[in-house]
Amino acid sequence: MAGGRHVQCCIAGGGPAGLMLGLLLARAGVSVAVLEKHADFLRDFRGDTIHPSTLEVMAELGLLDELLTLPHQKVSSLSAQVGATELVMADFSRLPTRCKFIAFMPQWDFLNLLARHASRYPGFSLLMNAKATGLIEEGGGVRGVRVKTPEGRFEIAADLVVAADGRHSTLRGAAGLPVEELGAPIDVLWFRISRSAGDPPRTMGRFAAGGIFVMIDRGDYWQCGLVIAKGGYDLVRAAGLPALRARIAGLAPFLSNRADEIRDWEQVKLLTVQVDRLSRWHKPGFICIGDAAHAMSPIGGVGINLAIQDAVAAANLLAVPLRENRVTAADLEAVQRRRMFPTRVTQRLQLAMQNRIIAPLLKATTDPTPPLALRLMAAFPPLRQIPARVIGLGVRPEHVRVTEARPALAAAS
């Protein structure tokens, strides 16, 4: 594309927040362009959890049945092994939702489904291999975005630019919005280990002296996360792969004969954990949502779902003003006001867990005993519904309020 173009909304980032917002706006009759810097969505070790709150949104869009035909694993409870004691810490079976489980699904399948349905609307376009490199600012406001592709550079004029380009957001930096760093004492190493029939049946976390090991059931393999101290990757790597394999075997002894499947460091991906949020998410003609507005800890796997809730709230509040070409600063402030409270509460809970439980455990030399909260959940099973609601629904779950104003061109294939 040369010479640029104009849309009512340009969204940087083709992740869950960006594509969900693009779909909802196009469905409401808004002209929208989504920019994705990669050529496809095939990137591993991403947030692959689709929580009941997101499944509810998909049901409201009429897409739930199709979504659940894609390969996935259903998890109706989350367990933790603390020392030698295994406990159920969240039970989703009583949530007031259609789906009383978390679906673990490759994120690329989820994104492809959203993109396919969004493309049915004439006002929607998805530009792959298109990186947003900067903002166009005129008259005290943002008027568009600069884009780089393998074929060249161009500009897109837009009534509203949305940064949904993640925790390392280029546009957030370009906008100069103030960031509050909240800190994170951990990083995570992600890798795969094959799954055997005799393995434990549950997705779970294992808490032991000096380590936390997360295991997510992905059918024929475990997606594993080894929690390490912040900045500790170089020390882990310097100790060598044999030490890493021994550490895995110590935390999950039944994997002892499979830890050697990790043959080189290319199989180990480092997730550098950061927790931050913008104190102001917007300026005239521009707003951040998802990780661009608030980077979350991986605790609870809630980041993707919080980002999708942002997208739904933004669509509910902005679709009509965008369609009528009258978006104001008050409209953008309404989005932040709606979503800041759940952001603050969720991050406060994550920080409490990081600082009071996880960080001390990484320094421990003896196996821990279960915290009082987990012991109470074991004694009184109904208490497991509290973390289930926090993880599965979140704080202030959103629902699709904006109606379909423009019919789709054809049924998605």
Image: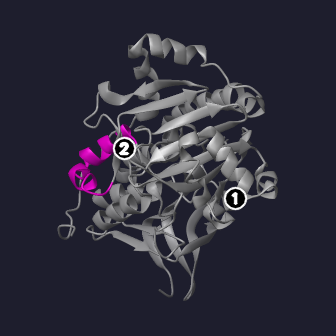
**Residue 185 seen in this snapshot:** yes
Q: Which amino acid does label 1 sit on?
A: Gly
**Residues rendered magenta in the picture:** 51-71
The relative height of residue 210 versus residue 317 in the rendered view (above or below) is: above
The relative height of residue 342 versus residue 103 in the rendered view (above or below) is: above
* Mark with earlier residue (1, 2): 2
Q: Which amino acid does label 2 sit on?
A: Thr
Magenta segment includes 64? yes
Percent across and percent down for residue 316 are 37, 45
Query: Which residue lies at the image location 69% right of the left edge and 59% below the top edge?
Result: 173
Nearer the viewer's eye, disc 1 or disc 2?
2
Element on which disc 2 rests: helix
Judge from the rendering whether residue 262 lies leftward or rightward of residue 198; answer left or right: right
Q: Nearer the viewer, residue 184 or 282?
A: 184
Query: Which residue lies at the image location 38% right of the left edge and 47% below the top edge?
Result: 197
Query: Mark 2: few, some, or many residues within 10 Å (few <14, many ≥20)?
Result: many
Which residue corresponds to mark 1? 173
Magenta segment includes 355? no
Q: Is the magenta stretch mostly helix, strand or loop?
A: helix
Which residue corresponds to mark 2? 54
Percent across and percent down for residue 363 are 78, 32
The relative height of residue 40 versus residue 256 in the rendered view (above or below) is: below
Query: Which residue lies at the image location 37% right of the left edge and 52% below the top edge?
Result: 319
Q: Nearer the viewer, residue 340 or 95?
A: 95
Query: In the picture, residue 93 is in which quadrant?
Result: top left
Judge from the rendering whether residue 80 lies leftward or rightward of residue 113; answer left or right: right
- The quadrant of the rendering that contains the C terminus is bottom left
Q: Do the residues labelled 1 and 2 touch (CB within 8 Å)?
A: no
